[in-house]
Image (tube, rainbow, N blue to C red):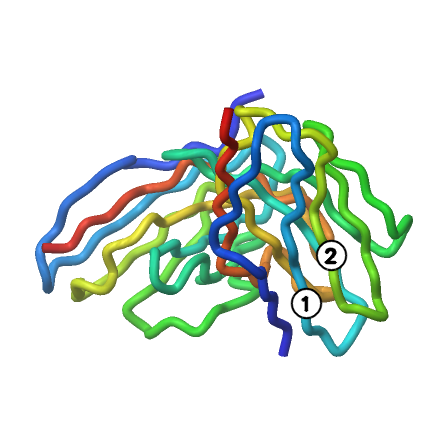
Amino acid sequence: AQSVTQLGSHVSVSEGALVLLRCNYSSSVPPYLFWYVQYPNQGLQLLLKYTSAATLVKGINGFEAEFKKSETSFHLTKPSAHMSDAAEYFCAVSGYNQGGKLIFGQGTELSVKP
Amino acid sequence: KAGVTQTPRYLIKTRGQQVTLSCSPISGHRSVSWYQQTPGQGLQFLFEYFSETQRNKGNFPGRFSGRQFSNSRSEMNVSTLELGDSALYLCASSLDPSRGGGELFFGEGSRLTVL
């Protein structure tokens, strides 16, 4: 069975600092991996996805993530945090032929201090 | 291009009642998925519909049901409401992620409170 673990339910960084949100997955077959962001009272928006092409994936708003099969990880990074990055971030996994069925991690709330 | 539209945005029900939530996908999207979001359980997959057929189903009791119409609009129904059904219900549409890996576009959700 597929599962996703996000390390740290809350992460706080200073504006301009590196953002690192951790995600480890468990899947018996090569997965599809996603990072979504949710702002208060809104739905989820896709930041980036890995679908077995390049292992380093670039997304919107300066975010990127690297797929590391040996570590079963898909950590999200951004070199310099902005105040507008404060939100909740979800890592998700799906398998081949799973369509719209995503397995989400518990989420990481990112706070950005001025 | 209009996004995914969910109605109603907020509703309050009492235990034992039933509720129907509606989702209009992005024009041209044929797949609609439903998720339940709660502070304790996080985001959990309910079911997915494609071309009016349920294609995937999560681990929810039979009180949770859904359907999709020929225009791809979808509804989900929860019968005999329980306090634990209080949640944000999110709908997501996609073109046809039949092999997975497709982007899901989420609506803003319907927030259900059960008293």
Which residue corresponds to mark 1?
Answer: A25
Q: Which of the labelled discs sits on residue A78, or is there none?
A: none
Whole-percent x, y for residue B72 in the image: 51, 43
Whether label 1 touches label 2, CB < 8 Å: yes
Q: Is residue B62 above or below residue A16?
A: below
Using a 10 Å C-alpha cutoff, classify the residue at mark 2 as few (fewer than 14 neighbours), some (14 to 19) or many (20 or more): many
Whole-percent x, y for residue B3 in the image: 52, 28
Whole-percent x, y for residue B67 in the image: 41, 55
* Residue B61 seen: yes
Q: Do labels 1 and 2 share a chain?
A: yes
Using a 10 Å C-alpha cutoff, classify the residue at mark 1 as few (fewer than 14 neighbours), some (14 to 19) or many (20 or more): many
Kindly identify the amino acid type of the residue bearing the numbered disc 1: Tyr
Q: Distance between the residues labelled 1 and 2?
A: 8 Å
Q: Which of the labelled discs sits on residue A74, or is there none?
A: 2
Q: Nearer the viewer, residue A81 or A95?
A: A81
The quarter of the image holding the N terminus of chain A is: bottom right
* Precedes in sequence: disc 1 or disc 2: 1
* Residue B106 seen: no
Give the residue at the far top of this rendering: B1
Is B60 on the left or on the right of A48, as rendered? left
